[in-house]
Amino acid sequence: MHLVPLVFYAAAAAGYAAHFAWRDPRTGRLATSLLGGAILAHTLLIGMQTMQAGHAPLVGTTAAISAFVWLLGLAYLYVELTTEEQAMGVFVACLLVGLYIIPALDPTVSPRPPVLQSPLFTVHVASMLFAYASFALAFVLGVTYVLLFNEIKAKHLGFFYARLPSLQVLDAMNGRVVSIGWALLTIGIAVGGVWATQVQGSPDPRAQAMSVLDPKILVALLCWGVYSFALVARRAIGWSGRRAAWLSAIAFVIVLLNFVPVGYFLTKSHNF
Amino acid sequence: MRLFAVGLSHRTAPVELRESVDFARGGLEAALAALAGRAAATEFVVLSTCNRAEIYAAGDSDAMADALGRFFSDYHRVDPDRVTPHLFVCRGVETARHLFRVAAGLDSLVVGEPQILGQVKAAYSAASDLRYTGALTNRLFHSAFSVGKRVRTETGLGEGAVSVSYAAIALARKIFGELKGLRVLILGAGEMAKLTGVHLKAQQVAQVTIASRTLATAERLAGELGGRAVDWAELDHALGAADIVITATGAAEPVLTRAQVERVMRSRRSRPLFVIDIAVPRDVEAAVADLDQVFLYNIDDLQAIVQDNLARRAAELARADAIVEDEVTRFAAWMQSREIIPTVVALRQRFEAIRQAELSRLEPKLSDLPPEARARLDEITHLIVEKLLLTPTEQLKAVSDAAMVMAYSDALNRLFRLAGEDARERQADRAASEVRSR
């Protein structure tokens, strides 16, 4: 059952790639339907896991990645259906497949330790994941901006020129999703902080390790700093366009590092 | 009923002649009404653009093509000897092939240009609004619309700008999204500067500013374009405000240097600047292109894009042709299946006639029946005839092969003595003309 979404995500990625290459509208519609199917299958899977475990599968990095993939897919689908812009699909779908491999390999749902039984925990995880999904979209927008920018700059109008929306649109969308992501990240970190002080007295060693110096928390704060800078720089010193694109691309690499290597191997506070 | 197309286009006639037979000039309605008054056609559509004047018609008479040809010279009061040698005539499926190629932009002067599909649609709706179209022309034109749409979405035939000015505008759109609200600065006040200004005005940019070494010439051009002139000394300020800069001065040395643009860019925050240098020799230092957020294109770059696009369009021709042929085959099959319809109608009429005849023959015996029983009898006999004809009708309508249509029609005509002598002769004529047209 847990492999069904993977198959769908991979098929959607292939569909988006084919649509990107040959621009056949039927392939485009098929890719969108496949992504819709993937999200539906994923929703059913998450629903089943919730019923089996008695709580939403948000405990531990693997479950968080699964939820992140689900949210990103949903967010992208929303953007696609409202803007009728499909060119980002191939980039987003590839990211979805790459990340979903992890939960597909390890589908077990971790039990929820007592320390996590707080509504604050759910708010914290949900807003963090939504923030990361926004940053993932910003990353894709940034990368495509740079690709298109380079083509126009080099006077070599080809593949991306024919397929991507204008630089102005990519830049404006980038600014918007970074703002949304930043707001959610701020909420997520703030709620996480409040909740961490509440569980300070808990005997759980992970609750004891909740400190600014824990790698996971430290890198999350670093991300907040980088995205805050991106926002301020855009408004105050005119860092839009290519600089903003690079910034959102690099910042998301930090997010991913925090997600996978740090989340699995380095943190002592977030290894549920 | 047969389809015809008679007309002339940029392929067959010089521009002076095309101008003198322009149907759009006097109004399409007038031309359609005149056509309705005289030609033997029962359905017709007039397509008139600057590159073509064509009449699409459906009718029974084979002499219709000649009548339509004469209409060109009569209606426009032009010497027939001047027009006739340039007219082309399409018959039957050829008509569909021609119209499909026209709608797809394959017959256009600039292959793949998109306007023609809209013009074909307008020509059709002008005729259909006035009820000059019928089953055959309706199907023909709707098929043509879907060919046009398929070629546009499934091939790259209409993609990429094929003139320097459109290449520049397409580039500007890729950088800025919409051109509305953009500010344009033109350096120079010569003929090239003026042409570019006119072109950009048509794109509804927010503001056109003209800067020239002599303020008076800049002001003159600004007056013509409805723009604003600035003094050369204020160039930095004007550059800072502009989104697109077009340079077209006759200066021998570059008028925009890297140092100057770099200075200006600092005040712009990362707002992109699109510089189009259409002057020969160059007006802009090549090093300007190295600056971040500056896109510099000169006339050679734009020409190279146009060449690329033309080559790419040529490569898409085969795919567009395949779509046209695909739709022509489909349309031909539909036309063939229509050939059987008179036979189907005749067969049904024959059966109904037999039923009526039998009912009236039995009239004396039925006269005692109460009215409800009479109605019931009528209904039952009608149902029996319908049931008997259901399968044959369906089967006949599904036949699309020409030879099979002929064979079936012939067999049914003989078996049920459907057609009168004259109808049979007409059918023989048609068969002969089919053979001739092959």
Image: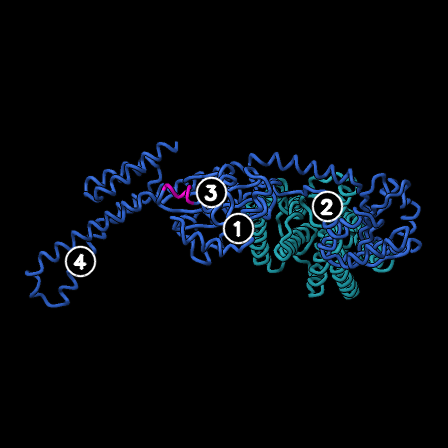
Chain colours: A cyan, B blue
- Distance of label 3 from label 4 (alpha carbons): 51 Å
Which tag is nearer the camera, tag 2 or tag 1?
A: 1
Name the residue that disc number 1 marks.
B23
Q: Tell me which numbered mark, 2 or 1, is placed earlier along the sequence.
A: 1
Q: Quadrant of residue B309?
A: top right
Q: Tell me which numbered mark, 3 or 4, is placed earlier along the sequence.
A: 3
The verdict on residue B66 being magenta is yes
SS for tag 3?
strand
Name the residue that disc number 4 marks.
B380
Callouts 2 and 4 on one subunit: yes
The number of numbered badges drawn on the structure is 4
- Distance of label 2 from label 4 (alpha carbons): 74 Å
Name the residue that disc number 2 marks.
B165
Q: Answer left or right for B258 relative to A151.
A: right
Q: Answer left or right for A225 relative to B164.
A: right
Name the residue that disc number 3 marks.
B6
Which tag is nearer the camera, tag 2 or tag 3?
A: 3
Q: As shown in the figure, which amino acid type bears the numbered disc 1?
A: Phe
Q: What is the x, y in percent for residue B402?
A: 34, 36
> Which quadrant is the N terminus of chain B positioned in?
top left
Q: As shown in the figure, which amino acid type bears the numbered disc 2?
A: Ser
Q: Residue at x 85, y 49 (%)?
A: B188
Most foreground residue, A186 or B349: B349
Q: Which residues are magenta?
A: B62-67
- Distance of label 4 from label 1 (alpha carbons): 56 Å
- Distance of label 2 from label 3 (alpha carbons): 35 Å
Q: Tell me which numbered mark, 4 or 1, is placed earlier along the sequence.
A: 1
Label 3 marks which chain's residue?
B
Mark 4 Cα within 10 Å, few/some/many (few <14, many 20+)?
few
Which tag is nearer the camera, tag 4 or tag 1?
A: 1
- Distance of label 2 from label 1 (alpha carbons): 30 Å
Q: As shown in the figure, which amino acid type bears the numbered disc 3?
A: Val
